Amino acid sequence: MMNRELLRKYFIMGSQNCHRDPREILLEAIEAGITMLQYREKGEGSLSGREKIKLGQDLRQICRKYSVPFIVNDDVELVDLLDADGIHVGQDDETVKKVRKKFPYKIIGLSVSNIDELKKSPIHLIDYVGAGPIFGTVTKEDAKKPVSVKWIQYLRNEYPNLPIVGIGGINESNSIEVMNAGADGVSVISAITKSDHIFETVQKL
């Protein structure tokens, strides 16, 4: 069972989310207190090929220096290339069974948005679930309809010991609702990447 405190302030980022150097943003976010990073280089304006790998290597190195777990979004090959601490997959990505077989000792997170997905998900093979989108989000182009904090309450009731991180439209003003619903942490993208005062933002999450 993973340390649930690692999910407390879970930062997700790729260059497409940043208006300045992602390395600088990550350093500021780590100084402010993020507990985990997910490298998600995906969507319009994202890097590919060598550039994607190079940025991943740089971010990985920063995380390693400051002992922040480094998770890769949905790219099995990149996990090996960057020696990531884990991988986060969605319902339509590589199956959890295959991922767990390939990475028996790495952190595996899975996005779960509704009861149907929950029934299909091998919860016993994962380390945490990403529950959401809790609120409306513009960061993910293919985001599903918001499920509200009631989804976290449901998951917590069904799985009292399951590490849960809320995702989707979360910021410093509504993160308390997510935590009060029973989540172990909140994951954010734009709340940090678009913040003019990253330290204050992370402190409030």
Image (tube, rainbow, N blue to C red):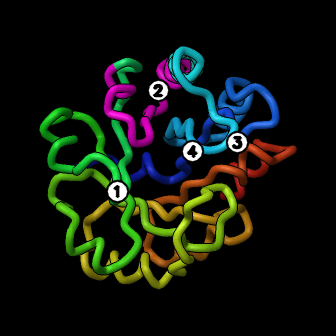
Where's residue 90, x and y in %? 37, 55
Residue at which label 1 appears: 92
Q: Give the mark nearer the N terminus: 2 vs 1.
A: 2
Name the residue located 81 percent from the left edge and 47 percent from the top edge. 195
CA distance separating discs 1 and 3: 22 Å
Q: Give the mark nearer the N terminus: 4 vs 3.
A: 4
Residue at which label 4 appears: 12
Q: Is residue 34 above or below residue 149?
A: above
Q: Is residue 40 left or right of residue 126?
A: right
Q: Give the mark nearer the N terminus: 1 vs 3.
A: 3
Name the residue located 28 percent from the left edge and 64 percent from the top edge. 162
The segment highlighted magenta reads 60-80
Q: Amino acid at mark 4?
A: Ile
Q: Which mark is residue 77?
A: none
Tell me the mark number nearer the camera, choosing from 4 and 3.
3
Q: Is residue 117 above or below residue 66?
A: below
Where's residue 20, x and y in %? 80, 30
* Residue density around tag 2, few if under 14, some if 14–19, many if 20 or more, within 10 Å: few
Q: Which mark is residue 17?
A: 3
Which type of secondary structure does the marked residue at label 3 adopt?
Answer: helix
Residue 180 covered by magenta stretch: no
Name the residue located 66 percent from the left edge and 58 percent from the top edge. 205
Q: Give the mark nearer the N terminus: 2 vs 3.
A: 3
